[in-house]
Image (cartoon, rainbow, N blue to C red):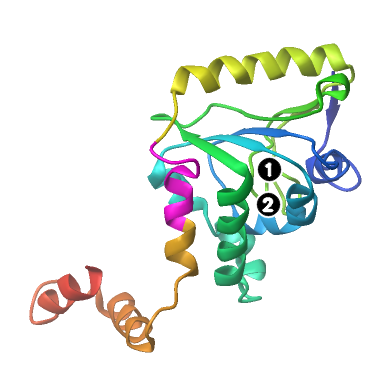
Amino acid sequence: MKLISNSGTERALDELKSWPTEGSTIDVMSPSFSVHAFDAVADQLERAGKCRMILGHGDVVAAGLFGGTEETALRARLKGRWLAGRASNWLKKAVDVRHTKAVPPQSLIVGGPSLARKALLGSCSFSTEGLGITPGAEFGIVQVAETAQEAETFGAWFETHWNGLGAGSHPGGQLVELLDEAASQRPPSQLYFQVLYQLFKDLGSGPITSLDRRLAA
């Protein structure tokens, strides 16, 4: 194994971009899924074959779908709805997702085919921070498998957890539902009411309380 800094020229993103080839496979274990991380590797992932993902439960995934403060500049590009639609289409075509009840304590990305297995382990969640696109945690660490045997070991570890979770109700899991909701057209009035809600939600009790309830619904 070797360690990479996940910054500069040693990013998980650069490792991952070189993996997918026609018919290859990608297995991902991550607490969350970011549409902006997907955007960075979408062309490679869509060229590959099947992908399997183990993700945290729906609330964790929903919170990270468009990232936190580190992705503010990316959200300003206003591509979120389009990216959600593209990610949803990819998931429906090529991805099987299973959700855990608890947040995975570490992230794992394993690529194939079996004769040329590759793996990343550590602070490499499927987010812009995890892929090294935006600054990550100060004490985060990412390890890269240097031999096919090492990668095969991590692949077997993923397989064990994958089989232990069992199949979901549909291949895309809760993630597809979240992406489809994010990609859907919204009436302008809904944005207006949400702005009002954010402006007045902290005013306390009084006449605005009933409005709070309606806007929060």
Q: Residue at x 66, y 69 (%)?
A: 73
Element class at badge 2: loop
Q: Residue at x 47, y 17 (%)?
A: 164
- Check disc 1 and report the residue beneath it: 130
Indicate the amino acid at tag 1.
Answer: Gly
Image quarter (top left, top right, bottom left or bottom right) of the C terminus? bottom left
Residue 174 in the magenta stretch? The answer is yes
**Nearest to the observer: residue 159 or residue 62:** 159
Q: Is residue 199 above or below residue 22?
A: below
Indicate the amino acid at tag 2.
Answer: Thr
Would residue 188 appear left or right of 163 to someone viewing this image?
A: left
Would you identify the image quadrant in which residue 9 lies? top right
**Nearest to the observer: residue 1 or residue 81:** 81
Q: Is residue 205 above or below residue 181?
A: below
Residue 202 seen from this side? no
Would you identify the image quadrant in which residue 30 lies? top right
Q: Position of residue 14 (x, y in %)?
A: 86, 45
Q: Is residue 129 above or below residue 117?
A: below
Residue 129 seen from this side? yes
Residue 47 in the magenta stretch? The answer is no
Image quarter (top left, top right, bottom left or bottom right) of the N terminus? top right
Near mark 1 (Cα within 10 A), the count class, few <14, some 14-19 or many ≥20, is many
Would you identify the image quadrant in which residue 122 lies? top right
Labels 2 and 1 touching (C-beta < 8 A)? yes
Give the CA separation, mark 2 to mark 1: 5 Å
Q: Position of residue 189 (x, y in %)?
A: 33, 87
The residue stretch that appears in magenta: 169-178
Q: Which mark is residue 128?
A: 2
Farthest residue, direction left? 206
Q: Is residue 93 above or below residue 125?
A: below
Magenta stretch secondary structure, dominant:
helix
